[in-house]
Amino acid sequence: MPLHLVRMLGPAMASVAEQIQSASQTIVFQIESIQFGNWFSIIRSFLAPSAVFELTTPYRTKNPALLRFWDRVRNIEEDIDEVIAKNGYSSVLDRTLFQHVRDDEIILCLNYDGLYGINNVNRFLQSSNPSPAVIWREATYKVGDPILFNESERFRSVLYNNLKGRIVAIVQGLDSLSFEVEVDRSLSEFDVMGTDLEFVKESTVRFTVFDHDASDEDDDALHTLVPFQVAYAVSIHKAQGLEYDSVKIVVTDANEEDLTHSIFYTAITRARERLRIFWTPETQRKVLQNLRRTVNPKDVELLAARRGLKRIC
């Protein structure tokens, strides 16, 4: 953690640590936080083991094999290899990666570029979609494309960040593009009242995106921006908080070192029913050998020295 952040966060972090030295603290495993969130991992160094409670019961699936695998990875057990082999979770990188297995399916990647990066996987799978392509600026959209909504002030109360959906209709005008999308939440006419959304049926709504020159709204950006991304494949970080019936994870030798314990655990726990990890045997071996929980000892020592805190572990 940079020194200026420690100086800024030091009093707050120390205050929390001092107040819960002997109290209860709930800690869950998640992807390493950026800047301000790092104290969740650091704080464990100042807490007695009796003050730490971990959430260990997943509710995303009832599949006993998946639950067992998650537990093994979470605790970095020695038999992770055996569990993977027994349940057929490992696959070589081949064309089966692109074979559609479930309607509710996602491919998780570690990077955007490269043969097995998010951009290329999305282009390839979208090209397999037989629906006519609609070109809007630099992007291509098709009926049937799975999507994920981005942060948008325009539909904030209804279509929130990371909401899953699917395009069910596209109408292209001279200076506009209208989408009908089915989203992964229940909606009613009351929910969309007072918004730019038009209720179609059940979980389906319609909205229009305008060309820059055609928008007469005060805030052009809100009405000219497509509020979602095509999501046949997404990054593991983007997938945090999401869940799918079928999850495929791509790990290549080019990014195997980026797959930390927390990132790997996040990826495998997105699956409700079916999981496949596409990697080579060598990459699998390296990833599993390098699984460890990481805490920056320099951050811990710096905080302890500045605030006079006593390390517990």
Image (cartoon, rainbow, N blue to C red):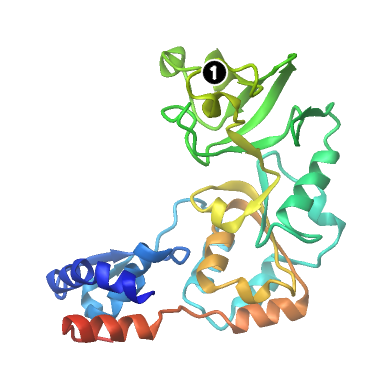
Q: Quadrant of residue 34?
A: bottom left
Name the residue nearer the viewer: 168 or 33. Answer: 33
Q: Is residue 178 above or below residue 226?
A: above
Residue where numbered disc 1 is placed: 202
Counting from the top left corner in percent of width and height, residue 304 is at 23, 84
Picture quarter with the N terminus: bottom left
Name the residue nearer the viewer: 10 or 129. Answer: 10
Counting from the top left corner in percent of width and height, residue 212 is at 64, 24
Q: Quadrant of residue 231?
A: top right
Three-letter amino acid code at disc 1? Glu
Secondary structure of residue under mark 1 = loop
Q: Is residue 236 above or below residue 223?
A: below
* Side of 114 where 293 appears, left or right: left
Picture quarter with the C terminus: bottom left
Name the residue nearer the viewer: 87 or 254. Answer: 254
Counting from the top left corner in percent of width and height, residue 45 is at 29, 81
Query: Does residue 100 appear in this view?
Result: no
Query: Does residue 264 appear in this view?
Result: yes
Give the residue at x 21% y 73%: 51
